[in-house]
Image (cartoon, rainbow, N blue to C red):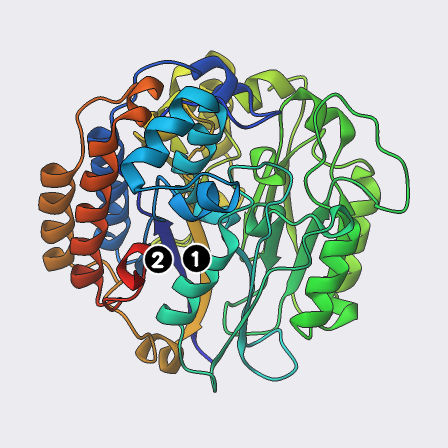
Amino acid sequence: MTAIEANFDGLVGPTHNYGGLSEGNLASARSEGLASSPREAVLEGIAKMKSLADIGLLQGVMPPHERPYLPLLRTLGFSGSDTQIIERVSREAPHLLRRASSASAMWAANAAMVSPSADSADGRVHFTSANLLTTGHRAIEAPQTQRALARIFADDERFCVHEALPYQSDFADEGAANHVRLCADHGEAGVELLVWGRDAASSYDGRFPARQTRQSCEAIARRHQLDPARTVLVQQSRTAIQAGAFHNDVVCVGTRTCLFYHEQAFEDRKGAVAAIRRAADGLFEPDFVEVPASEVSLDDAITSYLFNSQLLQVPGEDRLVLLAPEETRENTATRAYCDRLVSGNGPIGAVHFASVRQSMRNGGGPACLRLRVVLTQSEREALSANVIMTPDLFAALNAWGAKHYRESLMPADLADPQLLVESRQALDALTGLLDLGSDFYPFQRG
């Protein structure tokens, strides 16, 4: 069965700002309080999507969430008109306004865990919306994410969109940022690698939180009806987490038969490699590309986001292409490593660079911005919204972002009630562009 790996990128929302809300995300902490450019951010993201569509990849769009999110603030006891709530929260609890205004849903790698129909016992593509409960600003995302997935992948015969796991610390789930699928061909059965940071049955005392639990990975594997023999659960390195690798995709990325990872990505590196080999036995021979710490330190890997890159099978290319952020090229160690990487005969034959600086300053590289969904031809034809990037959609989105987004935004500007008006106008127009319906966002439902 022929299938391809599509990328669904999160559109940056109108309230994109540097609020410094993500504990353990060093880039986010460094940028806290700086001026952001929502317009530049959304246009960067749209340009990245267009560039991948132009080289023959299937590129989709994930809509941003409604922000500031007034239902959260009303639940917390603030009342009155929308304007009165924003003014009061900005005076009495500005930290809550930052949480309610975060545009973090742009990082679609955290939207859900996804398993293709070739891996599931019932032959459907399975999605589990991530509960993201470790950080307060992201824990509000799952219901709208589920609504978006259910609207785009609406055919119940081909797709199954699950709600988030229980909002309990035992089942903390950060989505596809902790998931890698390896295979010989996207349409054939593969090996699913689910990476966890802590076991909820044991104590954890790290400086930074381990956001994914073993128990959540086990639950998702059951939900998605995965073959236990082809499913590998691996512990992320505690060293990597405490160095700032808050998700596994900061130190590891993979596609097809290739796993590209840092030497310090996994707690038991040799055990992880052996487990993947066993799971792949009879299906394919894995290609392991391990980056030694002696060549690229963990700090350089995290600062440059070398691994928070997209590993792509580009039509017409014999070897894989790594799409890395510009910061990887600007870092001396990672630039030198990339030069050596492509000069050999390994599975990665080229490194291209993308400018997503607005996202990077908040701690998200090219891989953070996309959700990978393997789709057969019939599954592609069953998509229920206008979310696949085309020249016409690119032009429409570019004009939309230029019209509705502010050039500059400071965290203090979140207190401006006019920002809510502008954001809703932008999202209302977007639902028309993407054919999501007039009841997609809470404000549209009254």
Q: Residue at x 29, y 66 (%)?
A: 439
Say if residue 13 shows up in the picture: no
Task: Give the percent coordinates (x, y) of residue 357.
Answer: 33, 25
Task: Give the percent coordinates (x, y) of residue 137.
Answer: 51, 37
Helix, strand or loop for disc 2 = helix
Does residue 359 sit above or below 74 in this rendering? above
Look at mark 2 in the image and give the residue it sits on.
Answer: 442
Q: Amino acid at mark 1?
A: Gln
Q: Amino acid at mark 2?
A: Pro
Nearer-N-terminus badge (1/2)? 1
Task: Give the percent coordinates (x, y) of residue 220.
Answer: 68, 63
Does residue 242 sit above or below 176 in this rendering? above
Look at mark 1 in the image and give the residue it sits on.
Answer: 144
Residue occupying the far bottom of the picture: 157
> Split into 4 quadrants, where in the image is the C terminus?
bottom left
In the rendered picture of this protein, how many numbered marks are placed on residues? 2
Task: Give the percent coordinates (x, y) of residue 361.
Answer: 40, 22
Q: Quadrant of residue 349?
A: top left
Helix, strand or loop for disc 1 = helix
Which of the two discs, 1 and 2, sits closer to the camera?
A: 2
